[in-house]
Amino acid sequence: TSLPALRPEDWQHADQLAAGHTAAQAAQARLADALHNAETAEQRVQQAQAAANQCDQALQAATHQRALQQQAVHEAHARQATLADTIGTAQAECTALDTRLRAAVQAAGYDLPADHAPWLQARDAEWQRWRHTQAELQTLAQTITRLQAQCDAAQAQAELWSQRWAALQATSAGGADQPADANLQLPLSATLDDDRAHDGTADAAAALQASVAEIQRLQRTLAALEGRQAQAQTTRAQQATALEAAAHAWHDALQASPFADLGRFNAALLPEPERQRLAAQRDALLAAQQRTGALLQAAHARHAELQAQALTPQSLDELTARLAELESQRSAVSEQIGAHRALLTRDDQLRTTQQTLFAQISQQTANSDVWQRLDALIGSSKGDKFRKFAQGLTLDHLLQLANKHLARLHGRYLLRRKSTGELELEIVDAWQGDVARDTRTLSGGEGFLVSLALALALSDLVSNKTSIDSLFLDEGFGSLDGDTLEVALTALDSLNASGKMIGIISHVEALKERIPAQIRVVKGGGVGYSRLVV
């Protein structure tokens, strides 16, 4: 239902405005309820649409995932078949090579264990020991040759020393058989020769003992080297026997093989790069098989997980029927949404009209407030309210100017209007904690300063329209103390310096000395007779 339009004359009747406002509020409440119902229905439609979209997405995702998994399974089966063929071929080649290797190892007198790495390391260690033994045998042979030469030299030297020792002993025995007088007849030089011979005999005995000790040490070293040589020869003989047995076994295996001789066997061997390539290909195929198996297991696991995490237990036909039902519901709700949107459009139009009315009411209310404010300020039959209001404005301006002069004359006082009266004044004493008191409590000097400030402010106030170039002060200086008088005179001097003429009427002697230009009234001799002195 539409609201009745307000006529221009209805704005003057408050009851009709109130009735129109109440009807607008009721219509607004009805439209708010309709809007709430429309929003609720739209939310339901959105939820149904979201559920339908979610079902569609879940169905598409499941179908796509299933297709991907089937494709991955087919590819995995194809790769697995290819890898199985390749692995079968590689295993056949590996089996043939392993058979030939085992035959060759058994022919050499060894059993090929299951774990090849330790056995190969042991054989490599034996080969390294054999090489080391051969090197030691060569070194020992050289050492034995050198020591044998040293031993022969030492034996020859020992025989030489033995002969010299026997000669010395024979010489010593022959000298003892000679007579004593012959010994007495020997000159002093002969005695010295005997002493030298005795010393030589002692040195030869020491050298002989050292040679014997060296011969014994060399014999011990020679015996140890001969033992080590015998041990090395024994080990060499054993290894030569094993090598010969391995050669015979290899020859027998070659005779039993389909190869006629060693040349054909070597010709049948794969080249080292080809063998390495085949081994690398075998390792790559094994790794690919492992990866394919892991991928296949992961695909089966993912398929099982997706089946376990199915969003709904319904079948595809059931989901299609449910989707069709939701689509029909969505169409019905869309129609409801269209109807509610039409209502919302109508509500927006009514709201716009109502806002226009509210704006007109606000404008009329603002105009009415202005007139009511003016009526409260100046509305009276005699016009005294307006007069007091205008005088109050002028007084506020006058007090502002007066306080400026008063602050320059004496910073203690401040003039302001009373809150109880419209045109009454009070004085604020800054030296007494900003205490406000009546102007009638001012002393003579304080009253003079306040009056002077008001006079100067009045002069400034009217100077905007009328030029006031002179100021006359009649008395008032007698009640001032010395400091206050000095302040007042200083202020008057500044006014005089600004171009104003200041006239003072006073009997104070201090002013006579301060003011250079004076007009004195001198009392004459008779009664009522006086004269002027400039």
Image (tube, rainbow, N blue to C red):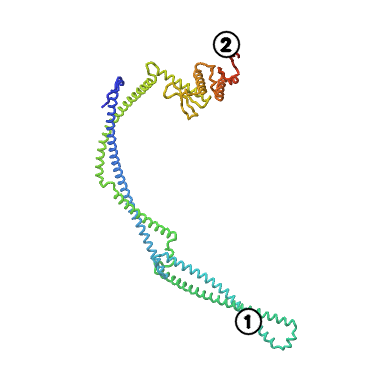
> Against 271, is 530 above or below?
above
Contact between marks 1 and 2 (CB within 8 A): the answer is no
Q: Mark 2 Cα within 10 Å, few/some/many (few <14, many 20+)?
A: few
Identify the residue at image location x=36%, y=58%.
87
Question: Which of the 4 quarters of the picture holds residue 384?
Answer: top left
> Against 482, is 198 above or below?
below
> Against 344, is 379 above or below?
above
Left or right: 477 as drawn, with respect to 243: right
Left or right: 426 as drawn, with respect to 38: right
Image coordinates of residue 414 in percent, x first then y, are 49, 25
Residue placed under numbered mark 1 in the picture: 162
| Mark 1 or 2, nearer chain start | 1
Q: Mark 1 Cα within 10 Å, few/some/many (few <14, many 20+)?
A: some
- Identify the mark at residue 492; answer none if there is no mark: none
Closer to the camera in the image, 214 or 16: 16
Question: Which of the 4 quarters of the picture holds residue 167?
Answer: bottom right
Identify the residue at image location x=26%, y=39%.
327
Quick one: quadrant of the N terminus?
top left
Closer to the camera in the image, 518 or 471: 518
Identify the residue at image location x=63%, y=78%.
206
Q: Name which residue type carries label 2.
A: Val
Q: How many marks?
A: 2
Residue placed under numbered mark 2 in the picture: 527
Closer to the camera in the image, 352 or 47: 352
> Against 479, is 134 above or below?
below
Q: Look at the numbered disc 1 and give the secondary structure of its residue.
A: helix
Q: Look at the numbered disc 2 and give the secondary structure of its residue.
A: loop
Image coordinates of residue 522 in percent, x first then y, are 59, 14
Image coordinates of residue 214 in percent, x first then y, are 59, 76
Question: Which of the 4 quarters of the picture holds residue 52?
Answer: top left
